[in-house]
Image (cartoon, rainbow, N blue to C red):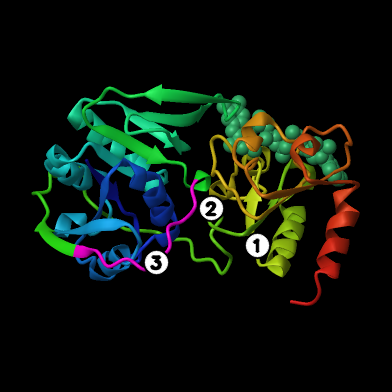
Amino acid sequence: MSVLLLAELSQGHLATDAVSKALSAALPLGDVHILIASDDGQDAAAEAASLQGVSKVILAQHDSLAHGLAEPIAALIFSLAGSYQHIIAPSTAFSKNILPRVAALLDVMVLSDIIAVHDVDTFDRPIFAGNAIQTVISSDLVKVLTVRTTAFKAVEKGGKASIEMIVGVPDPELSSWLEDIEVVSERPDLISAKIVVSGGRGMGSKENFDAIIQLADKMGAAVGASRAAVDLGYAPNDWQVGQTGKVVAPDLYLAVGISGAIQHLAGMKDSKIIVAINKDEDAPIFKVADYALVGDLFSVVPELTEKMGTE
Ligand code: FAD
């Protein structure tokens, strides 16, 4: 049995955290081949080859693969699919754009966001915003899966897989690249950060939300937000944590002025330690919190920021 793992690249390098966690989900399924699709990809291929347990890295080079466009990558995977029983990728915006296209070309279903692998056909995935876990047995000949990376441990480095170069398939010319606009930030990436400080509607305004940013900066944390905070314009859309935002599982999640709606919990309840600050002692967030601080955030947050020491 062979498994094709689609790797995500970031500025020419492997998105190691996401890929090595998806690899840990893929290893029980068979020999894992990591696919690097790029116009160059040499560095990423070497990084992928160094992950433990990888059997082979396939480096597909083609101009059409330079910018991560979904259509040429889906066509490439479809051309390789005959040799694989599983096609798998970390569940990120990148793969969510590609794997459904692959599944459509193969006329199979996508099993999204798997959190456990029972055997080659059987997987667990969360449904109803994480309130129930569904066990799915797939009878598709090729199983197309995305992996919720927060549910798996990263595979260590120390592997020495071979790298096979292939030429990508012709561009189906269904889309063309115009430009990438990247948000440059000194802060850790929200999904892989060890600490996340999130603010909600309780912050009251965009200006007040700065207190969250200051606290996060003092703690070396990423900044998150509830959907209410995003909808009100306190925080940008890509900071949203939850069912329709990002799923995070940091060592420490600090929720400030967030009530704890199930859609928010769906994105953070697997965090190792949850600290909640809320003035309402009955706020649902306290049901999942390891530490509950009942108080007015406008006095608690500045005090906490001060106590974190100087920057
Ligand atoms: P609120 O529920 O209004 O809570 C604000 C909290 O701040 C309250 O608990 C209040 O006690 C506290 N507070 C107020 N003032 C202070 C103060 N001075 N000091 C201390 N505490 C204070 N939500 C998400 O977050 N992420 C999602 O991905 C998401 N997806 C959704 C998808 C769907 C289909 C739907 C229907 C909803 C979704 N939501 C999501 C919205 C979700 O249901 C809630 O509406 C939202 O999470 C509420 O955000 P909040 O906790 O910031 O606001």
- Location of residue 194 (image quadrant): bottom right
Q: Secondary structure at mark 1?
A: loop
Q: Is residue 143 left or right of residue 273?
A: left
Q: Is residue 140 above or below residue 40?
A: above
Residue type beneath disc 3: Lys
Q: Is residue 83 left or right of residue 280?
A: left
From the image, state whether disc 3 or disc 2 is nearer to you: 3
**Residue 79 in the image, given as x and y percentages of width and height:** 12, 42
Residue at the image position 46 percent from the left and 37 percent from the top? 116
Residue linked to disc 2: 191
Checking the image for residue 221, the label placed there is 1
Q: Are marks 1 and 3 in contact (CB under 8 Å)?
A: no
Q: Are marks 3 and 2 in contact (CB under 8 Å)?
A: no
Q: Is residue 201 visible?
A: yes
Residue linked to disc 3: 157
Q: Quadrant of ligand 1?
A: top right
Disc 3/disc 2 C-alpha distance (Å): 20 Å
- Location of residue 279 (image quadrant): top right
Residue type beneath disc 1: Ala
Image quadrant in which the N terminus is located: top left
Q: Magenta stretch mostly in which secondary structure?
A: loop
Q: Is residue 216 above or below residue 240?
A: below
Mark earlier in primary sequence (1, 3) = 3
Residue at the image position 32 percent from the left and 67 percent from the top? 50
Image quadrant in which the C terminus is located: bottom right
Checking the image for residue 78, the label placed there is none
